[in-house]
Amino acid sequence: MTAQPPKPRLTELSYAAAVCFVCVAYLAALAAASVFVRADVVADPLWEGAGADALATVVIFAFSCAVRNTSMYDAYWSVAPVPLAVFWAGHASADGDPTRAWLVVALVCIWGLRLTLNWTQHFTGMAYEDWRYTDFRVKTGRLYPLVDFFGLHFFPTVIVFIAMLPVWVATMQGGREFWWLDVVAAAVTLSAISIEALADVQLHRFLKTREPGEIMQTGLWRWSRHPNYFGQMLFWWGLALFAIAVDTAFWWTASGALAISLMFVFISVPLLDTRSIERRPGYAEHARRVSALIPLPRR
């Protein structure tokens, strides 16, 4: 096992000071992205958004390295899509339907704001780092900076950007006017936000009163081991429906929703379940009886 150097003294910051530090990092990332856009390096808003997103990720990575804490990136998942959606909407095609465009932007903003606020409830200060990152740091040793940048920062940015392509379609491409499939897409997306929000509220209440080793088995968690993940997956599929509502030729933009779903099914859920089986007696039986993601009757 590779010896790990001590964490920087920033870990001693108060909670309020730590949140301010994170805000400074994200404002710096937004400023860098804005400079890139204003420089007109590329003319196409799609690739402008991609370049700005990549540069902002590099800025957050620099802050992560400065404090030796990969969890600096955690909020990026929900923060970055908001300015990206607003940017594309600001360049909306005259042939597009403004109802669809701004409805999609509003849904992304609601989702991003709620999920970011949820992050603040998990974030306890600069000393906090997700246990998965800590494990990677120990296992990869000197290679961790490469794993950190390409695997834990840049890869999620690419996946989320691909999942945001339906927003680019809905805001910037012509196509059908607002119709019943847009209503279905809005219903799916709102349902996803609601499911994820309810699951998070129920989880926070449980964590305040739980006994050591106790398993969450009430509310949505009675029917699914990870209902918050299910809501997250459903959100991206809802956005994909908006792109298909513009034109069925854009079906390929659902690739981002598919990638995120596969990431949850084959990476996130197995990691969390393995850890829970190791730490909580009875969790293996719980996993056998309760659906992993989609809320279903207990077996």
Image (cartoon, rainbow, N blue to C red):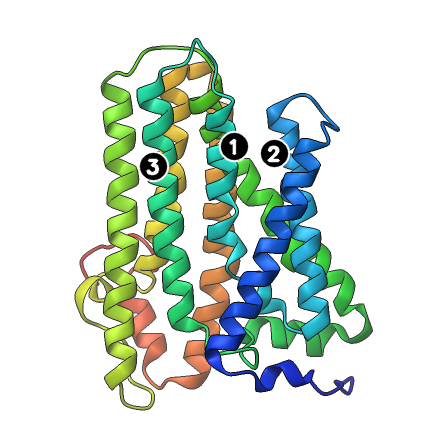
Q: Are marks 2 and 1 in contact (CB under 8 Å)?
A: yes
Dot 3: element = helix
- From the viewer's side, name the closer residue of 30 and 165: 30
Q: Are marks 2 and 3 in contact (CB under 8 Å)?
A: no
Residue at 25% in and 77% down = 206
Q: Which mark is residue 164?
A: none
> Could you tell which of marks 2 and 1 lies nearer the N-terminus?
2
Residue at 65% in and 30% down = 48
* Residue mark closest to the camera, 2 vs 1: 1
Residue 41 in view? yes
Quarter placement of the N terminus: bottom right
> Could you tell which of marks 3 and 1 lies nearer the N-terminus?
1
Residue 154: image x %, image y %? 67, 51
Left or right of residue 47: residue 125:
left
Residue 294: image x %, image y %? 29, 52
Instruction: Give the residue at mark 2.
Output: 49
